[in-house]
Image: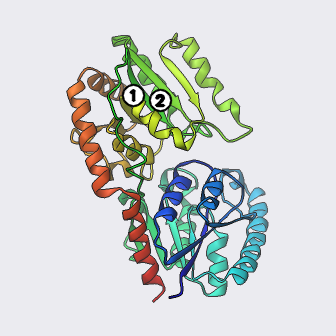
């Protein structure tokens, strides 16, 4: 039987949420699927895929980001997008894919190139765009393009799906993780201080590291046996993003209680999660899902999240985690203090959290659901 050839287009190849989710899906697809990945830049994800025998291409692809949201710069984007479309048309003619699967909402050229060649296109949407990235009118146009140029739109959560109204082609398929890779520690560690962590890149402030530090300060006013870990790194050339956070820590006298871990390699992420007693997700805008929540829960760590966006598909308050009203810094500090003072509650939430991930958010489950979509669009 001929294998189904799928070309995946993604905006980056680093070790971040969307790229990690794509890698987890590809490694679990059945042998009937031949995966080919195209990115605009090299990165760790490509190395990992190539190690699994996946063909990869580095090709300039236009990505619509904030730098283009200016009347003059949008012209530059149009020129770049047209060039990208013709590059992809040339590539698709060579490799003859059965399906084109775009892994990022802001990558347009693949959808147009697929339409020009009559190839079914799937758009994988991971963001809640109405809260960031694009102005409202431009998002309405972009949403029309997504629905018009796609046979299916995969949304990673109910909150992402809501952006597409009653469009039948938009479906929810949650991202999944490897629950054998992310697992509880073999033995419990005794730590002098309760470890509370946040994990996310510092490329922009959307992940809420400054909010995390404000909550840390409030919590440390009550008890000193807390240790706060900030893990994540920035893309090359924007290291100035970390400096205000470091300055804030020094000014507030928190240097003894706050650690900056910088880049944590993918293979070390389970160890980082296991080190934490509590994982916090306090993004400034609603998350599409929140992969770090799944990773921490799979390691039986207690989690706290703002009660908005995709995390509402994952965290059930006081059952497998704690939910705090969005942007409520005092509420976040109080949740941290509650968990820090109640080891039994941390254990209960951690155990239930892993059960949730194993039953509903495994990478194999995501891959099978996506394979079903592939079979539907090829009919």
- Is residue 152 found left or right of 312 in the rendered image? right
Question: Of the numbered discs in the image, which one, if any, rests on residue 350?
Answer: none
* Residue 318, visible in the rendered structure: yes
Mark 1 = which residue?
Answer: 329
Asked if 130 appears above or below 305 in the picture, the reply is below
Mark 2 = which residue?
Answer: 211
Q: Work out which quarter of the rendered image holds the C terminus and state it.
A: bottom left
> In this orientation, which residue lies closer to the viewer: 350 or 315?
350
Dot 2: within a 10 Å radius of its alpha carbon, few (fewer than 14), some, or many (20 or more) residues?
some
Asked if 184 appears above or below 218 in the picture, the reply is below
Q: Secondary structure at mark 1?
A: helix
Q: Which percent across, then down, holds residue 187?
A: 33, 30
| Residue name at image x 64 percent, y 38 percent | 234
Q: Which percent across, then down, holds residue 377?
A: 47, 83
Asked if 370 appears above or below 315 in the picture, the reply is below
Badges 2 and 1: C-beta atoms under 8 Å apart?
yes
Of callouts 2 and 1, the N-terminal one? 2
| Residue name at image x 50 percent, y 35 percent | 208
* Residue 169, visible in the rendered structure: no
> In this orientation, which residue lies closer to the viewer: 266 or 176?
266
- Is residue 117 found left or right of 90 in the rendered image? left
- Is residue 116 found left or right of 349 in the rendered image? right
Q: Secondary structure at mark 2?
A: helix
- Is residue 305 found left or right of 343 in the rendered image? right
Q: Which percent across, then down, holds residue 135?
A: 57, 55
């Amino acid at each position: 039987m001929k294998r189904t050839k799928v070309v995946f287009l993604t905006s980056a190849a680093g070790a971040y949420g969307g790229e990690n989710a794509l890698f987890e899906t590809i490694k679990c697809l059945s042998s009937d699927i031949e995966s080919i990945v195209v990115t605009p830049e090299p990165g760790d994800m490509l190395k990992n895929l190539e190690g699994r025998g996946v063909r990869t291409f580095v090709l300039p692809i236009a990505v619509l980001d904030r730098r283009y949201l200016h009347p003059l710069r949008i012209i530059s984007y149009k020129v770049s997008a047209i060039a990208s479309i013709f590059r992809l048309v040339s590539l698709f003619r060579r490799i003859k894919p059965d399906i084109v699967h775009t892994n990022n909402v802001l990558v347009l050229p693949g959808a147009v190139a697929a339409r020009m060649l009559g190839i079914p296109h799937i758009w994988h949407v991971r963001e809640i765009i109405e809260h960031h990235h694009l102005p409202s009118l431009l998002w309405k146009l972009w949403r029309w393009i997504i629905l018009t140029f796609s046979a299916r739109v995969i949304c990673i959560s109910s909150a992402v799906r809501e952006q597409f109204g009653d469009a039948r082609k938009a479906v929810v398929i949650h991202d999944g993780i490897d629950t054998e890779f992310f697992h509880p520690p073999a033995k419990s560690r005794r730590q002098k201080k309760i470890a509370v962590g946040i994990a996310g890149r510092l490329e922009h402030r959307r992940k809420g590291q400054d909010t995390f530090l404000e909550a840390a300060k409030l919590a440390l006013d009550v008890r000193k046996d807390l240790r706060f870990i900030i893990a994540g790194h920035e893309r090359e050339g924007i290291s100035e993003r970390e400096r205000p956070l470091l300055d804030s820590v020094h000014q507030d006298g928190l240097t003894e209680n706050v650690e900056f871990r910088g880049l944590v390699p993918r293979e070390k992420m389970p160890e980082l999660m296991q080190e934490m007693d509590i994982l916090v997700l306090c993004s400034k805008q609603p998350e599409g899902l929140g992969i770090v929540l799944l990773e921490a829960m799979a390691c039986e760590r207690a989690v706290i999240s703002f009660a908005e966006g995709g995390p509402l598909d994952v965290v059930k308050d006081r059952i497998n985690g704690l939910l705090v009203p969005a942007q409520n810094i005092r509420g976040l500090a109080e949740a941290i203090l509650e968990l820090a003072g109640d080891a039994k509650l941390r254990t209960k939430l951690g155990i239930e959290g892993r059960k949730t991930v194993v039953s509903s958010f495994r990478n194999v489950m995501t891959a099978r659901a996506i394979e079903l979509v592939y079979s539907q669009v090829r009919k």
